Amino acid sequence: MKSEPVFKNAIVRPPTPNFADGLTTAGLGAPDFARALEQHGRYAGALAHHGVAVVTAAPDAAFPDATFVEDVAVMTPGGAVLMRPGAKSRAGEVASLRSTIASCVPIAGAIEAPGSVDGGDVCAAGETFFIGLSSRTDEEGARQLGEILARQGFAVRIADVRRADGLLHLKSGMAWLGGRRLLAVDALARDPAFEGYERVTVPDDETYAANAVAIGGRVLLAGGFLKTRRAVEAAGLEVVALDMSEFQKMDGGLSCLSLRF
Ligand code: CIR
């Protein structure tokens, strides 16, 4: 199985004019829609520039958070597993994106009630999947997803994001960099789930930068987080910095904006 973070395809979905009505705890003010669209365009452009075939789903204003497509499914070699998002306002996003997902890969399963999982709590790392328990992902959802992944031959490790103050999702605090190497904030570092992994540290005053997307030896990183950038470069990886300010205002990061496979 893959030990490098390589993916050839991605689904993205541009934000809608009511994007500011989505869920947020960031306290950074309302996002500017035009700027969000522009940042989203650059994000999709960066993926394409690095060899990824990008499928753009039609925006859906019924769900202001729908641009955060990562939360709706988990992509596996066996196909997409549909999530059951933990926030009520986001439940309908699964049906809304289903046909786009199904046009790309088979649907391999779904999380069923009463379990809930947000894709942002699931980190694929080669032969291992990390699943984070959070305010959105519960034990039952993690158990169901764990079973599906184990049937496909993956090792599953459960982390507890609830102990890490201020993190919405698992991947709000960590990213897989390839092999046994992670980018992660201190608050997650001691979780037994990550035992045996080397860590590139994200300093406490730059936690937002932990939500990154690695493609081979490159890392898409939120712009403006210079200490994290230096740490990633010192680890021998090339950084592609992207301005994410408008998505940060809505608690979303780089990984949230695509479903990668
Ligand atoms: C939410 O609270 O659900 C959205 N405003 C942000 C979701 C971010 N998604 C992610 O971290 N995977």
Image (cartoon, rainbow, N blue to C red):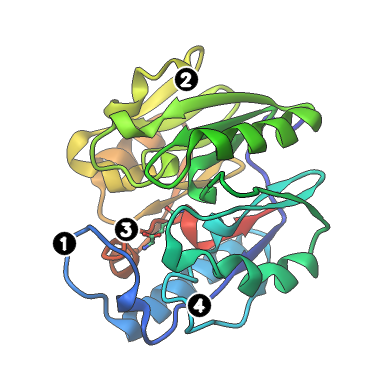
In the rendered structure, which amino acid carries the disc numbered 2? Phe
The residue identified by callout 1 is 27
Residue situated in front as seen by the camera: 107 or 201: 107
The residue identified by callout 4 is 14
Q: Are marks 1 and 3 in contact (CB under 8 Å)?
A: no
The residue identified by callout 2 is 194
- The numbered mark, 1 or 2, whose residue comes first in the sequence reads 1
CA distance separating discs 4 and 3: 16 Å
CA distance separating discs 1 and 3: 9 Å
Residue 33 in view (yes/no): yes
- The numbered mark, 4 or 2, whose residue comes first in the sequence reads 4
Local secondary structure at mark 2: helix
Local secondary structure at mark 4: loop
Q: On the picture, is 186 further left or further right than 27?
A: right
- Write down the quadrant of residue 44 in the picture: bottom right
Mark 3 beta carbon near ligand 1 (under 8 Å): yes
In the rendered structure, which amino acid carries the disc numbered 4? Pro
The residue identified by callout 3 is 251
Residue 245 locus on image (x, y percent):
28, 65
Return the residue found at the far top.
Answer: 196
Residue 84 locus on image (x, y percent):
57, 54
- The numbered mark, 4 or 3, whose residue comes first in the sequence reads 4
Residue 177 in view (yes/no): no
In the rendered structure, which amino acid carries the disc numbered 3? Asp
